[in-house]
Amino acid sequence: MNAKPRPWPLRGAALAVALFAAGCASSAQRPVLYPNDHYDRVGAGVAQQDIDDCMGQAQAFGADAGRGQAVAGSTLTGALIGGATAGAWGAVRGDAAERALAGAAAGGAGGLTRGALNAGRPSSTFRNFVQRCLGERGYDVIGWR
């Protein structure tokens, strides 16, 4: 009995890598400012420079550290859960190793995708730092997009 290799784990991995790349390529979220008196006085150009400066300060002080670790952690968590779940089902059916491997691949791809989709969202520490910096300059941050 000559079994055909199963290409679906490779396809899933390729899809996950493509999704990860798309997630990383998307622009990071930026603060949205309310057009208060200060904003009206300085104008949109100066406001954008101030946003860039505050975001740079947040990065310099390490407020956004751990984004890559979050993606890696999400991928590892997905792989562990997928492998354990599929392996348990495989133990009942008698093909635990094969199912655990497939489950780990699927879970890892799901975790990677989740991490990539969230990669453009700054951490709450980063957002708080930027909002405080902009607030001290006279701006009113009303959200992020």
Image (tube, rainbow, N blue to C red):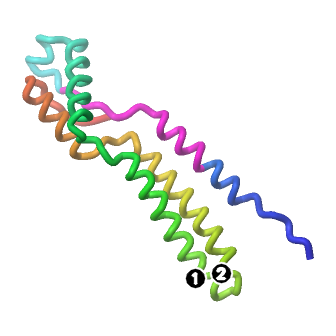
| Residue 92 shown left or right of residue 122 in the figure | right
Residue for point 65% across, 55% down = 12
Give the residue pinned by disc 1: 88
Residue for point 54% across, 39% down = 21
Give the residue pinned by disc 2: 96
Whichever of callouts 1 and 2 sits on the residue coming sooner in the sequence is: 1
Q: Quadrant of the N terminus?
A: bottom right
Label 2 neighbour load within 10 Å: few <14, some 14-19, many 20+ = some
Three-letter amino acid code at the position of disc 2: Ala
Instruction: Name the spot of residue 82 as percent of width and height, x first.
Output: 54, 69
| Residue 99 shown left or right of residue 81 in the figure | right
Front-most of 31 and 37?
31
Q: How many marks?
A: 2
| Residue 132 shown left or right of residue 88 in the figure | left
Residue 63, above or below 40: below
Instruction: Name the spot of residue 72 as percent of width and height, x first.
Output: 45, 54
Region rendered in magenta = 16-33
Residue 88, above or below 131: below
Instruction: Name the spot of residue 75 as percent of width and height, x first.
Output: 48, 57
Residue 22, above or below 68: above
Is residue 118 shown in magenta? no
Pointer 1 and pointer 2: residues touching (CB < 8 Å)? Answer: yes
